[in-house]
Image (spheres, rainbow, N blue to C red):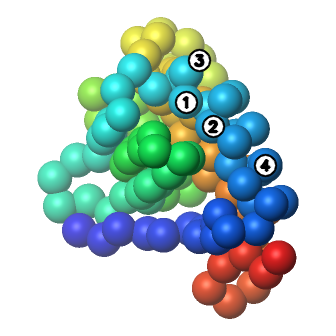
């Protein structure tokens, strides 16, 4: 099992504080709990530890890793083959809480990575 850290944002700078606050407002409502996991046993996964003020969100998911294979889709019940369907078709039948989880996870993942330096250890350079 491997955990991947994609970005680290130093919240000491005003620019980072504003970024984190706005991202929190848009993303946090998509998670039903403050700690959510979506990965299987002995699998690799991405982890988000999002701290905004005194609030914290921890989210772990394997969907971005395993969906690098264009033949797979990750749903709320596991990994499966697309079997001629698109990911959108398969996911459209999944649980709404899981679709919200994926949306929030991807939003935080993508925006944090874009905000941080894409070179080296991906730490923010204010």
Image spot of residue 64 (x, y percent): 52, 51
Crowd class of label 4 (few under 14; some 14 to 19; many from 20; radius 10 Å): few
Badge 3 is on which residue? 89
Crowd class of label 1 (few under 14; some 14 to 19; many from 20; radius 10 Å): some
| Separation of marks 3 and 4 at Cα, in angstroms | 36 Å
| Separation of marks 2 and 4 at Cα, in angstroms | 10 Å
Image spot of residue 78 (x, y percent): 30, 35
Residue 112's disc is none
Pair 2/4: label in front: 4
Crowd class of label 2 (few under 14; some 14 to 19; many from 20; radius 10 Å): some
**Earlier-in-chain disc, 3 versus 4:** 4
Circles 2 and 1, Cβ within 8 Å, touching? The answer is yes
Image spot of residue 33 (x, y percent): 35, 26
**Earlier-in-chain disc, 2 versus 3:** 2
Q: Quadrant of residue 35?
A: top left
Badge 2 is on which residue? 24
Badge 1 is on which residue? 28
Image spot of residue 123 (x, y percent): 66, 79
Report whether residue 63 is seen: no
Badge 4 is on which residue? 18
Q: Residue furthest left?
A: 41
């Amino acid at each position: 099992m491997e955990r991947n850290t994609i970005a680290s944002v130093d919240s000491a700078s005003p620019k980072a504080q504003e970024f984190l606050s706005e991202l929190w407002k848009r993303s946090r409502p998509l998670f039903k709990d403050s700690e959510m996991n979506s990965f299987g046993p002995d699998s690799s996964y991405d982890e988000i530890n999002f701290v905004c003020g005194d609030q914290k969100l921890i989210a772990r998911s394997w969907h971005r890793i395993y969906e690098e294979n264009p033949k797979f889709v990750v749903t709320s019940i596991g990994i499966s083959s697309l079997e001629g369907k698109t990911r959108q078709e398969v996911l459209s039948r999944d649980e709404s809480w899981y679709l919200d989880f994926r949306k929030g996870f991807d939003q935080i993942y993508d925006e944090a990575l874009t905000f941080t330096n894409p070179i080296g250890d991906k730490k923010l350079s204010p």
